Image (tube, coloured by chain):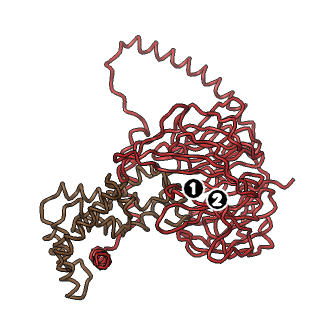
Chain colours: A red, B brown
Amino acid sequence: MSSEFETRLERRVRDWAESSDREFDAHALTRAAVDAGAAQYGGSFGFRRLRSAGRPHLASAWLLLLIGLLLTLAVGIFVVGALLRDSDRPLARNGLIAYSVGSVFSNPNGPIHLMNPDGSDDRIVGFGTCPRFTSDGTKLIYRSGSDPTEYVQGVLTVASADGSEARQLDDKSTFAGVLSPDGTKVAELVLVSDEQPAREIQLRDVGVDPPPGTLGEVLVPARPDGDHSYQSLTWSPDGRSIAFAVMKQVDRGDTTSESRVEVNVVDVASGQVTTVSKRPGAYSMPLSWSPDSSEIAYLGLADGAAPPVLPPTGQAPSEIGERIFTVGADGSGDRQRSERSEQYVGLAWSPDGNSIAFEYFEPPQLTFGVLEIQDDSLRTRATSTQVRLQGWSPDSSTLLLSGIEPAAVMLLPANLASDPETITTSDERLDCVSWQAVPR
Amino acid sequence: MAPGAERLVVLAAAGDEEAFEQIVRHHHRDLTRIAFVVTGDPDIADQAAAATWVIAWKRLRSLREPERLKPWLCSIAANEARQLVRSQRRRRVVEIAVVNDERRTAPDPATRIGDVDLANAMARLSVDDRSLVALRYICGLNSTELAQVTGLTASGVRGRLAKILDRLRKELGDE
């Protein structure tokens, strides 16, 4: 009886709420939110207005000015010399760069472009989104479909690296699936039921029909407690393992909860799962494998730090800075790599294994950095526009970036000694930029 | 939440305005409906939903589990609506609901009468109870998720909802 009334009530409440619907302008709402955020953070940009500290004696001021000029000159000569030496390293120009025009969310059937790394010979080779080269550099793979924000299936196209001989291999592909480095398998997170947020990891061969009602075979089942989430599926470069994060919020008995994070590795052939880190962390989205598939870079809190405590949903938790760590794929050799505590959002291990590129959020934009594995030294460079890290050149000399505003493909020397070089621009957004590993 | 949409959250959290706009486009309608159920006033509901996006833009990165975006946004909207109601108790909710009839789209007089009855019944609930109703029936949160939002236990939420249902059944004459 009560459930019947509840069903009727739910319908009435929904109808009543829908009767208040009005047209809205999503762009204007976004601008208002961004502008409000910029106003909050505005103090950290541009010139700071310094308070006057009184009027110094004129002679002392001139003397200080002279000393300052001499010191500036000496430092300038040293810095320019160092920069000239560093900038001797040219930007990489080998292989091809692929990109799609239009956001993956707003236009999943935009043109797929190929060009040389100096921006020359830019041409359209197909239509879809998120082009990617296979790890051996011989094939180009992209998806197309209708609505990537929904759980829909689309078409997976595999072509030669120059875009020719395109074949539609698969019409079961979803936009959330993660392709293996050789493009033969897809791993995907799939909801177990609508009632629980828990998901399982499914795996299937590209071009092979999955079992009815599924997207593939279950590789990692959902955990029995159901109250966790798997995230950040990341294939190892050798295609034998997948790293993923496990997030869980544990009720602390009051209105708060504790954030628990694990980094796990699953062996694709056997399905065996190894927990390689239980280090407390706040934001485990980016994982990156070393090129020899032996280690994983991830984010976490320093040794001895307690798990973050989260306030009730809807209340804003304070920002928690994290550090960069690396750990062996078998869980051995966990090591803190960065002393800097930042809001990291992206990690990319270089193809030569010597460096890890990272990006971190300094509202309202990102700053880039490179961490040297040999001595854990760091260098960073802020950009004046909205830019995202997309990856490395095959020779590890250059970072591949995509500009959001203005839309552009950019190259940045890995020594960060100069500003990014724009190699192409577009009136529409450019998404999913990929650099071809030159076939050996 | 669709798995593909998680990338939107990550991009938006990293300052990608276009990704954020897609999130706004997808969720704004539900947020205004939640705020309307809490406030009974479409104007205040609009304010609450807009304020939700300001908070979301600043704090999206603190959302630890991107697949829980919707409950997170819903609870922010409900909180904002509650705060606006508390700070703007200038008119009774039932009065506001009737005054703004011209914005409504219900063509059927019986439906309009039903809406007014429901608005009156809702107006007699506390703002916290209206918030619970909105999060349950508009956002679709289950008792575990409601417990995380309200700070109650899951069984406490179920008990509270049962009392609200009982009261609304009597108010609406649906015995």
**Residue placed under numbered mark 1 in the picture:** A230
Q: Secondary structure at mark 2?
A: strand
Identify residue type, mark 2. Val
Q: What chain letter is assigned to the residue under label 2? A: A
Q: What chain letter is assigned to the residue under label 1? A: A
Location of residue A54 with respect to A245 vertically, above or below? above
Name the side, left or right, on which A68 lies relative to B168.
right
CA gap between label 1 and label 2 equals: 10 Å
Name the side, left or right, on which B14 lies relative to A75.
left
Q: Closer to the observer: label 1 or label 2? A: 2
Quadrant housing residue B136:
bottom left
Q: Residue at x 49, y 38 (%)?
A: A321
**Residue placed under numbered mark 2 in the picture:** A220
Task: Determine crowd level at label 2: few under 14, some 14-19, many 20+ residues with C-alpha closer than 10 A.
Answer: some
Front residue of this view, candidates A235 and A436: A235
Q: Position of residue A269 (x, y in %)?
A: 76, 58
Q: Are marks 1 and 2 on the same chain?
A: yes
Identify residue type, mark 1. Tyr
Q: Are marks 1 and 2 in contact (CB under 8 Å)?
A: yes
Front residue of this view, candidates A209 and B144: B144
